[in-house]
Amino acid sequence: MKPKAPTHTPPPDAADRRAVAPVICYPIDGLPVPDMALYQAARGSAEKTAEIMVPPRDAKVFQVPAGHFFRITSVEGPQVGDLNLWNLHDLDERFYSGKTRALHGTHLSVSDRIWSSHPFLRPIATITDDTLDWYGFDEFGGSVHDVIGTRCDPYTHNLLAGGQYHHCCHSNLTRALADYLDCPTGDAEPHIHDVLNVFMCTGFTRDTGQYFMKASPVRSGDYLEFFAEIDLLGALSTCPGGDCSSEHSSDTAACYPLLVEVFAPAKRMLKDWSQPPMNGYDRSHGV
């Protein structure tokens, strides 16, 4: 795809307009700062309470109580995962990918937080450990754990390639949530939302501005770990693209399971910690 040729002549001050310095849209100096030292100390006392293995090209649902940790690990080979998170007690409060991106950037790592949807808009999880934090941004502008993509879905697949493919992450997550809720997939599907692309290496091309993916640097034993700020319901899909080195809706790409583990710290370690309150806006909207 070539860049679109302009149809208008640049104005005399075009260079000056382009040279205007950018301004950060959402300075985060006023946000509550996560107490990473507290989380690290609590993690040191934690014991595993649950685990679930997510098979290739499938998804599983899991629960994480507030104040617990959960870890997503690549266990057999390079594999990308698509993560949804909800308030365990109210599925209307769910991970807000767009606002998380606006606050923390295109890719997440340690001390970045997962923010929930309006009208709640509060941190529901905090990233506490990341074995891929060394990757940074590569020469192509790629990095890992993105909140810029959505999730592979059968509607886009049908639009671009035709056919009926049922193992896109959107469908995997829909089936898993429907099983958990014991409801038809049509009732579960509206709850599926834009994801954190765990381990996925992505960016935007510099010439056309298109979303790209490349082989994930994840290897067996790598993990991303979170602290649950509220009672969470999670759903994780193992992407049918495997490491997403060539395509992300495939029955031929090498795919591997992902392991989700939950850890409970000693209660004494979090005696001074409390769950984040819901957003303080009064919801009057000027009326």
Image (cartoon, rainbow, N blue to C red):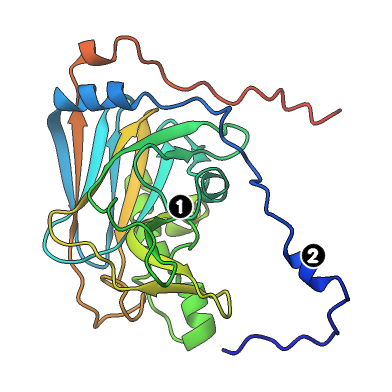
Q: Nearer the viewer, mark 2 or mark 1?
A: 2
Mark 2 or mark 1: which comes first in sequence?
2
Rendered position, 225 above or below 152: above
What residue is shown at x 33% (from left), y 27% (from top)?
Answer: 36
Residue at image location 22% in from the left, 10% down from the top: 268
How many numbered discs, if any?
2
The image quarter in which residue 195 lies: bottom left
Q: Residue at x 40, y 16 (%)?
A: 274
Q: Is residue 217 above or below residue 222?
A: below
Q: Residue drawn 68% across and 25% down?
A: 281
- Rendered location of residue 122, percent (x, y): 52, 31
Which of 130 and 173 lies nearest the eye of the viewer? Answer: 130
Q: Is residue 86 left or right of residue 73?
A: right
Amino acid carrying mark 1 in the image: Ala
**Residue placed under numbered mark 2 in the picture:** 17
Q: How busy is the neighbourhood of tag 2: few (under 14 within 10 Å), some, or many (20 plus)?
A: few
Nearer-the-camera pick, 53 or 210: 210
Splitting the image into 4 quarters, where does residue 77 fall? bottom left
Q: Dot 2: what SS?
A: helix
Q: Which residue is mark 1?
A: 188
Q: Position of residue 235 (x, y in %)?
A: 34, 49
Tell me, yes or no, whether the two marked residues, 2 and 1, touch with CB atoms within 8 Å: no
The quadrant of the rendering that contains the N terminus is bottom right
Side (left or right) of 168 relative to 41: right
Q: Residues within 10 Å of mark 1 (few under 14, many from 20)?
A: some
Instruction: Please give left or right for residue 120 compared with residue 5 in the image.
Output: left
**What amino acid is labelled 2 in the image?**
Arg
* Snapshot quadrant of residue 264: top left
- Secondary structure of the residue carrying tag 1 is helix
The spot of residue 248 in percent (x, y) is 36, 75
